[in-house]
Image (cartoon, rainbow, N blue to C red):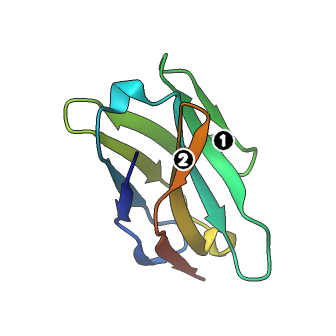
Amino acid sequence: QVQLVESGGGLVQAGGSLRLSCVVSGSIKSINFLSWCRQAPGRQRESIAHINNGGSTDYADSAKGRFAISIDSAKNMVYLQMDSLKPEDTAVYYCRALQNGVLYWGQGTQVTVSS
């Protein structure tokens, strides 16, 4: 069983930065991959940043060059650094983990980017 708790969302002006954090219960080393997803009003949830247990990362085109996913295994934390934020980044951001074929989700944290 994995539990995920996100934090760090908020209101920021366009061009600003936020760092989202996700606390992962249990051993982060037993997890196959971790990712950040987001869901804007009226839109489907989308994966925007992904890191596997080998440390390889992948990003949606909308996140490349602006967002960075990272892990601190010692603290069981996964982060999403978001720079150069745009109004279209406004969404609820979720942490997601895959362990033994089961997907786990956090409760989400709201990010609002004002123009």
Q: Position of residue 82 (x, y in %)?
A: 48, 54
- State the residue lying farthest toward the top: 54
* Quarter holding residue 88: bottom right
Please identify the quadrant where the N terminus is shown.
top left
> Quick one: SS at disc 1?
loop
Q: Are marks 1 and 2 in contact (CB under 8 Å)?
A: yes
Q: Between residue 88 and residue 3, name the one nearer to us.
A: 3
Q: Which mark is residue 67?
A: 2
Q: Position of residue 77 (x, y in %)?
A: 30, 43
Question: Does residue 78 appear to the left or right of 26 in the view shown?
Answer: right
Whether 85 is drawn above or below 68: the answer is below
Whether 114 is drawn above or below 88: the answer is below
Which residue occupies 41% across, 71% down?
Answer: 9
Amino acid bearing label 1: Lys
Gap between marks 1 and 2 measured at Cα? 6 Å
> Quick one: SS at disc 2?
strand
Amino acid bearing label 2: Phe
Residue beneath disc 1: 64
Q: Residues within 10 Å of mark 1 (few under 14, many from 20)?
A: few
Q: Between residue 23 and residue 2, name the one nearer to us.
A: 2
Q: Which mark is residue 7?
A: none
